[in-house]
Amino acid sequence: MMRFYYVYVLESIKDSSRYIGFTNNLKERLEAHNKGLNFLTKPHMPYKLIYFEGCTNTNDAKRREHYFKKTGGRRFLAKRLREYYKM
């Protein structure tokens, strides 16, 4: 059975701040963020999932997460989510 690793972007409903991370269980991770189990995201809860990508290798997912946290990755996400931000 193939295992997937997800790179995800969350947006705070409270203040529109974003959080980028990776996990092998997207549903559980989102629930953990919204229950306040993550120190960095707790002050900005609740969150909604606005973007994710699936990878079959954990190293690929980590590399993609790292890219999204850099300037080029943030530009990519801004272009990719252009219609989302028009809402």
Image (spheres, rainbow, N blue to C red):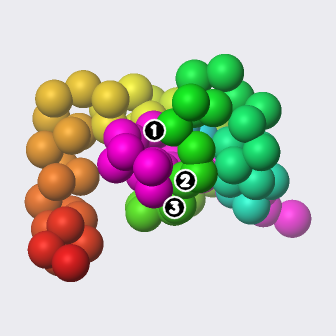
Question: Closest to the observer: 82 or 47?
Answer: 47
- The residue under label 3 is 49
Q: Position of residue 62 (x, y in %)?
A: 52, 31
Q: CA distance from mark 3 to mark 2?
A: 7 Å
Mark 3 burial class by Cα count in 10 Å: few <14, some 14-19, many 20+: some
Amino acid type shown at disc 3:
Leu
Q: Are marks 3 and 2 in contact (CB under 8 Å)?
A: yes
Q: Is residue 29 visible?
A: no
Q: Are marks 1 and 2 in contact (CB under 8 Å)?
A: yes
Q: Which of label 1 and label 2 is nearer to you?
A: 2
Secondary structure, mark 2, is: strand
- The residue under label 1 is 19
Q: Could you tell me which residue is drawn at 42 percent across and 63 percent down? A: 50
Q: CA distance from mark 1 to mark 3?
A: 10 Å
Q: Could you tell me which residue is drawn at 51 percent across and 37 percent down? A: 44
Q: Which of label 3 and label 2 is nearer to you?
A: 2
What span is in magenta?
A: 1-20
Q: Position of residue 11 (x, y in %)?
A: 42, 51
Secondary structure, mark 1, is: strand
Q: Is residue 41 visible?
A: yes
Question: Closest to the observer: 24 or 19?
Answer: 19
Quarter of the image where the N terminus is located: bottom right
Which labelled disc corresponds to residue 47?
2
Q: Could you tell me which residue is drawn at 74 percent across and 61 percent down? A: 27
Amino acid type shown at disc 1:
Tyr
Q: Position of residue 46 (x, y in %)?
A: 59, 51
Question: Closest to the observer: 66 or 18?
Answer: 18
Secondary structure, mark 3, is: strand
Q: Position of residue 78 (x, y in %)?
A: 16, 54
Q: Could you tell me which residue is drawn at 39 percent across and 27 percent down? A: 66
Which label's residue is closer to the chain start, 1 or 2? 1
Q: Residue furthest top?
A: 39
